Amino acid sequence: MLLRVDNLTKIYGRGARANDDLSLQVGEGEVLGLLGHNGAGKTTLLNQVAGLARPTSGTIVLDGRDPVADPAYARRVCALQLQAQAPLTGVTPRQAIDMLGRIRGGRRQRVRERTGQLLAALDITEWADTPGEKLSGGVRRLTAFCMAVVEPGRLVMLDEPTNDVDPVRRRLIWQQVRQLAADGCAVVVVTHNVTEAERSVDRVVVLDHGRVATTGTPVELRRRASGDLRLELTLTPGVAAPEPPSWATRTTVRGQHMVISVASAGAPQAIAWAQHLHASESVAQFVLNPISLEEIYVGLTGTSEEDHDAALAA
């Protein structure tokens, strides 16, 4: 494993634990999604791996060495995109990306070529020579991503890389994340966008109050759920919700929407039951889908993507 974290604890101030006996690992060519509510300890973990903060206890091994004892080594091996926007006042995206690539030891011609490739891949070439203070938040975030990966090192850590980015370019970012892994980098992505992560990561670690709540591939996490299918019914206006069937593992009703968790083996039963309700006009429509990673995440932490977005807007 390129990165191994064992029993990591970070205590701030009067005993506040940002990380609490946390252990995880990530290998070359792997994309690890790091999920968790605000304050779950995700950013603190990245800062310790990158040599920017010292753990209270526990160990970090990065490519066989201790980044806490040798933070200069950590900065050479790690590329880190911070959650905060990169300072771009007085420089253009092209200049900022090129400068970071050279600072990280890239050869002039190689960095120049790589800068152009990234600007094109993320579809921001038209802003490449625009002063940073005139850029939108989304273009600034995309520029910060390019700055982190222009000369990536062996471990790339991205803290909320798609924040403020439009849906089309979010997909382009995830394509570049997958390309980094294909090139042999280990990639750790902190994100609140569980839906995006589900499509793009190899493995997930969910943090809750500084601890690992669960880890595994998206497929493994679905298999562990009490019902790995989700039957969604839109109730006919004015008709009461039907009694949940005995095979339902979990049922929720919100307004005109009823959601039932179903084990895979119960799929034929669920469809037959829903079809009967539809034929009797008790429900207007229904759909049976696999349970999403976001639902599993909410079940573990009690925080949904919508909750996070609402908190940011408040």
Image (cartoon, grey):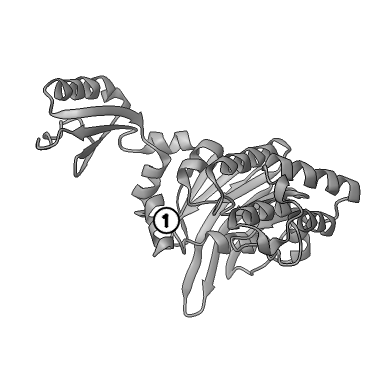
Is 9 left, or right, of 68 in this rendering?
left
The correct choice, above or below, for 29 with respect to 16 in the image is: above
Mark 1 = which residue?
Answer: 309
Tally the marks.
Answer: 1
Instruction: Tell me the amino acid under the disc marked 1.
Output: Asp
Q: 58 above or below 128?
A: below
Residue extending farthest bottom = 14
Q: Quadrant of residue 220?
A: top left
Front-most of 29 and 304? 304
Front position in the image: 268 or 148: 148
Task: Please tell me which residue lies in front, 68 or 264.
Answer: 264
Give the residue drawn at x 62%, y 46%: 26
User: At 57% across and 44% down in the image, what residue appears?
Assistant: 170
- Percent position (x, y) of residue 17? 48, 69
Helix, strand or loop status at disc 1? helix
In this rendering, would 65 be left or right of 157? right
Image spot of residue 173 (x, y percent) = 62, 43
Place of residue 144 in the rendered image (x, y in percent of width and height, measured from the top left): 67, 56
Residue at 68% in and 50% down = 156
Relative vertical location of residue 190 with respect to residue 116 in this rendering, above or below = below
Asked whether residue 60 is in view, the answer is: yes
Mark 1, Cα crowd under 10 Å, few <14 / some 14-19 / many 20+, is: few
Left or right position of 306 against 154: left
Q: Quadrant of the C terminus?
A: bottom left
**Observer-nearest of 281 and 276:** 281
Q: Is residue 216 visible?
A: no
In x, y percent, where is residue 158? 62, 53
**Residue 292 sits in quarter:** top left
Q: Work out which quarter of the rendered image holds the N terminus and state it.
A: top right
